[in-house]
Amino acid sequence: MAGSGRLTTHVLDTMHGKPARGMRLDLLFVHGDHTHHISEGYTNADGRVDQPLLDEDQFQHGIYEIHFHVGQYFERLGVELENPFLDVVPVRFEISADSHYHVPLLVSPFAYSTYRGS
């Protein structure tokens, strides 16, 4: 059953001190021990996806993952790393109420952090 909430994200490139433009991300719904791919998107010049990852029509309670393609992003920027560390950063979280869920990612080639934003 669809809810009335929405899911958004924002990616900040802490290596360069700016929004992460052009980062690919995938949204997955978790079913027990497997996942179902819902959508794919790319961040805009502000590090955001133009539309909510989930909106009222698709929003439902459950466990989700956003896969941020960090390695591909830094490679595309020409960041040369002798020993690449991060490739795809999965962030798994649960949606349990009809409200706005915002999942930001702050990322460099060697570290990341996330939190429930507003």
Image (cartoon, grey):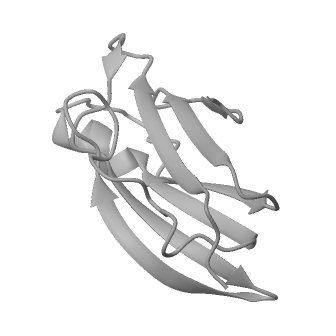
Q: Is residue 48 left or right of residue 86?
A: left
Name above or below for residue 86 compared with residue 20.
below
- Residue furthest to the front in view is 4
Please tell me which residue lies in front, 13 or 49: 49
- Label total for image: 0
Please tell me which residue lies in front, 113 or 61: 61
Q: Is residue 37 left or right of residue 102?
A: left
Q: Residue at x 72, y 58 (%)?
A: 98
Name above or below for residue 35 compared with residue 89.
below
Q: Residue at x 63, y 29 (%)?
A: 118
Q: Residue at x 38, y 34 (%)?
A: 82
Name above or below for residue 21 compared with residue 68.
above
Q: Is residue 114 left or right of residue 93?
A: left
- Quarter placement of the N terminus: bottom right
- Residue furthest to the top in view is 17
The percent coordinates of residue 81 (x first, y second) are: 35, 32
Q: Residue at x 55, y 53 (%)?
A: 7
The percent coordinates of residue 106 (x first, y second) are: 53, 27
Figure quadrant of residue 70: top left
Name above or below for residue 81 compared with residue 3.
above
The percent coordinates of residue 38 (x first, y second) are: 46, 79
Figure quadrant of residue 16: top left
